[in-house]
Image (cartoon, rainbow, N blue to C red):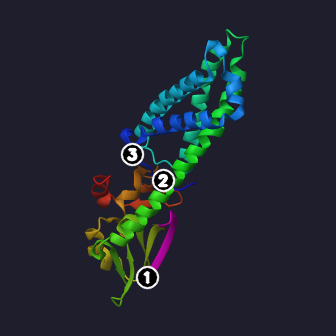
């Protein structure tokens, strides 16, 4: 749940939720009539329960159209985690329930009355317990799609597009996709490769010098930021300066330490962010 979120970007790809969620809501309630929906709404305001179900579904369409527009904008600039997304989805359902409760209480006003908060309690229950199934299905499908995409990319990636790490005797020790490398650090006569594997940070150590890796790093877009570090600009979130004037690169992935940036390498790295 604390791993980076990977879903479709752009409002055009997110707007499907404004159709799929209300459609699922409408069909599910039409077929199963959960939580006494028919008895609760039938005849209120002189309308059949089907009319009220259609109106509630239209409210969902309006809410999801707006919330997905906001999400698509924020997702371009904020590194969402999966748990952020779960909270966001719950918030969308809650907003739906708030407007559904307003609609319900207004219709009940001419039929004996129903307080807004009683209507909210009912609408929250029916919205959360109905829409949770559709969210779970879509999230599961997204996770499966991401996994299949990773597997396909790994199988189809040409060998010459992979980063190759050799030891001091020119023996190939590690071949890895450059996109998963976070940074490479020097440790005496060793170099350490810090990378992501199944959304977990891993480290591989081999005996060699940083100088021997220079050509391979430039070939695959890794940038030297310090005499002891190469970083992957794809994973850099920001360059910051502390009170003592030392510049650090901060990563988008939680749990990765800040990497110092020498002044002589600052401009080169900053231009790539």
Residue 107 rendering spot, x and y as whole percentages:
63, 14
Q: Decide: few, some or many residues near mark 1? Use Cα within 10 Å; few <14, some 14-19, many ≥20.
A: some
Q: Residue drawn at (27%, 69%), measured in percent from left and top?
A: 218
Residue 65 rendering spot, x and y as whole percentages:
45, 31
Q: Residue drawn at (38%, 38%), measured in percent from left and top?
A: 11
Which picture quadrant has residue 14?
top left
Residue that carries the numbered disc 3 in the rendered image: 9
Mark positioned earlier in the residue sequence (3 or 2): 3
Secondary structure of the residue carrying tag 1 is strand
Secondary structure of the residue carrying tag 3 is loop
Residue that carries the numbered disc 2 in the rendered image: 142
User: CB atoms at circles 1 and 3 under 8 Å apart?
Assistant: no
Residue 182 visible somewhere in the drawing: no
Marks 1 and 3 sit apart, C-alpha to C-alpha, by 38 Å
Mark positioned earlier in the residue sequence (1 or 3): 3
Query: What stretch of residues is rendered in magenta?
Result: 197-206
Identify the disc placed on residue 206. 1
């Amino acid at each position: 749940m604390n791993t980076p979120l990977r879903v479709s970007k752009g409002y055009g790809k997110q707007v499907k939720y404004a159709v799929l969620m209300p459609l699922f809501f409408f069909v599910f309630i039409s077929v199963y009539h959960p939580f006494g929906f028919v008895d609760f709404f039938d005849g209120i305001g002189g309308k059949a329960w089907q009319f009220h179900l259609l109106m509630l579904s239209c409210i969902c369409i309006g809410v999801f159209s707006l919330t997905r527009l906001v999400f698509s904008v924020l997702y371009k600039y904020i590194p969402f985690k999966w748990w952020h997304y779960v909270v966001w989805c719950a918030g969308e359902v809650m907003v739906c329930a708030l407007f559904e409760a307003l609609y319900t209480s207004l219709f009940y006003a001419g039929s004996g009355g129903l307080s807004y908060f009683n209507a909210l309690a009912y609408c929250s229950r029916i919205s959360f317990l109905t829409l949770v199934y559709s969210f779970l299905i879509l999230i599961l499908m997204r996770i499966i799609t991401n996994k299949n995409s990773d597997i396909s990319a790994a199988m189809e990636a040409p060998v010459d597009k992979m980063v190759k790490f050799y030891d001091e005797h020119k023996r190939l020790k590690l071949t890895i996709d450059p996109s998963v490398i976070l940074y490479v650090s020097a440790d005496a006569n060793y170099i350490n490769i810090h990378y992501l594997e199944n959304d977990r940070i891993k480290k591989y150590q081999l005996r060699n010098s940083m100088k021997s890796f220079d050509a391979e790093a430039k070939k695959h877009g890794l940038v030297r930021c310090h005499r002891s570090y190469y970083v992957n600009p794809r994973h850099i979130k920001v360059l910051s300066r502390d009170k003592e004037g030392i510049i650090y690169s901060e990563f988008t992935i939680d749990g990765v330490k800040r990497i110092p940036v020498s002044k002589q390498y600052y401009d080169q790295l900053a231009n790539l962010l």
